[in-house]
Image (spheres, rainbow, N blue to C red):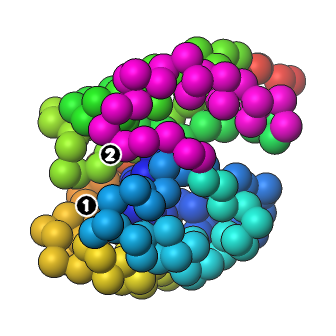
Amino acid sequence: MVPDDIELGCGALLHHIVKETDVLCVTLSDNQKNPDLKQVRNEHIRSMKILGVPEEKVVFGTFQTRVFPDSRQEILEYFLKLRKEFQPDLIFTHSKQDVHQDHNTMTDEALRAFRGITVLGFDVVRSSYGFFPNFLAQVTEEDVNKKIEALAEYETYRDRYYFNNELTRSIMVRHGALAQCPFAEGFDILRIVGTFEK
């Protein structure tokens, strides 16, 4: 991912669960080669802090944006290293409905690297087409407000339509309606791994 995708895709749920579990937020590029995006790295760290994620749990890779497909093998190996070190039980990545080439590469390599682990795909409205959630996670109004507050840290993207507070809230209201609750975040089920217990 790049800075902001985590917050846009699952910021409210992240805020909801961060105190109950160990999270690691991985961004494959910090966009520092783009002169227009020099502040994005620090904005991401501040945004994550609002969601309750400490800086040491925010990791930046060194991959160059827009050409992730050219680094497919290196991204796979990066994910395999993270799997060994962090040993996650659940992975969030981009929806399969996302048309961005970097997002596609991350999702494909996450499914390869994290075999045997549940993988859920989130929606990033600017690059997803035909997304419809088949996994809905209820969140609170506080979680929704924290997501909006976290996104406000991105001065760089302030004027982008997909950072609009009303849009952000309306998406979670819609997903909440599908789940018959006030607010929810929605995901694609890319893979579910579970056990039945007595």
- Horizontal arrangement in the rendering, residue 35 relative to residue 107 (left or right): left
Whether tag 1 and tag 2 are in contact, CB under 8 A, the answer is yes
Residue located 59% across and 46% down the image = 61
The type of residue carrying mark 1 is Ile
Q: Is residue 74 magenta?
A: yes
Few, some or many residues within 10 Å of mark 1 (<14, 14–19, 20+): some
In the image, which disc is placed on residue 152? none
In the image, which disc is placed on residue 123? 2
Find residue 75 and report its image quarter: top right
- Horizontal arrangement in the rendering, residue 79 relative to residue 159 (left or right): right
Few, some or many residues within 10 Å of mark 2 (<14, 14–19, 20+): many
Residue 187 % position (x, y): 41, 41
Residue 165 % position (x, y): 24, 78
Vertical placement of 64 versus 179: above or below? Answer: above
Residue located 56% across and 45% down the image = 62
Find residue 102 and report its image quarter: top left
- Magenta stretch: give its range: 61-85
Q: Is residue 91 magenta?
A: no
The type of residue carrying mark 2 is Asp
Residue 2 % position (x, y): 43, 52
Residue located 32% across and 45% down the image = 123
Inspect this view and state whether residue 82 appears. Answer: yes
Vertical placement of 1 versus 110: above or below? Answer: below
Residue 39 % position (x, y): 42, 76
- Horizontal arrangement in the rendering, residue 158 relative to residue 117 (left or right): left
- Horizontal arrangement in the rendering, residue 159 relative to residue 107 (left or right): left
Residue that numbered label 1 is attached to: 171
* Secondary structure mainly formed by the magenta segment: helix
Pick the residue in front: 10 or 184. 10
Local secondary structure at mark 1: helix
